[in-house]
Image (cartoon, grey):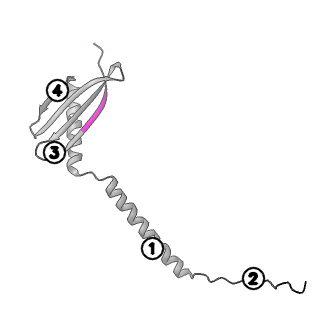
Amino acid sequence: MTLMKKRCLHTQLKGSTLVEVLVALVIITLVMALAATLYAKIAYKRPDNTVALQLRLKALAQEAKREGDFETAHYETDDNLLIDRHTEPYRGDTLLLLLELTGQKKGTGETGIYREIIIKDIP
């Protein structure tokens, strides 16, 4: 028993000061905020022209609903949009229609799609 080593139960570890911890926390927060901002800009990148095209397609869909014109058609609008309007029964239901408008801007090649489910009027 005399050969037993003496163990020290209370060893002191070198710690960081409060200033070092706060600086590290600020750096980590800034890096995370920068990464989140870059991700949001890349993931949700949607030019204003695309939004305008979507709004125009929605307006054309509302106009078709108001007039009751659900026939498949291909036409060009005054503002140089090539529109394809396509309707089909939604999931085989005779009272529901899927109205799909596809628009393409002449010259720029921007495209947009608008889909809406419409309840067909019973004659």
- From the viewer's perspective, tell me whether residue 22 is left or right of residue 107: right
Give whichever of 37, 108 is nearer the camera. 108
- From the viewer's perspective, tell me whether residue 6 is left or right of residue 35: right
Q: Which residues are magenta?
A: 113-123
N-term mark: 1 or 2: 2
| Label 3, label 1: how far apart the Cα atoms are | 43 Å
- From the viewer's perspective, tell me whether residue 95 is left or right of residue 7: left
Question: Which residue position holds label 3?
Answer: 109
Whether tag 4 and tag 2 are in contact, CB under 8 A, the answer is: no
N-term mark: 3 or 4: 4
At label 3, the amino acid type is: Gly
| Label 3, label 4: how far apart the Cα atoms are | 20 Å
Question: Which residue position holds label 2?
Answer: 10
Which quadrant of the figure has residue 18?
bottom right
Q: Residue at x 39, y 63 (%)?
A: 35
| Label 1, label 2: how far apart the Cα atoms are | 33 Å
Question: Which residue position holds label 4?
Answer: 73
Question: Which residue position holds label 1?
Answer: 27
Q: Picture coordinates of residue 120 (x, y %)?
A: 30, 20
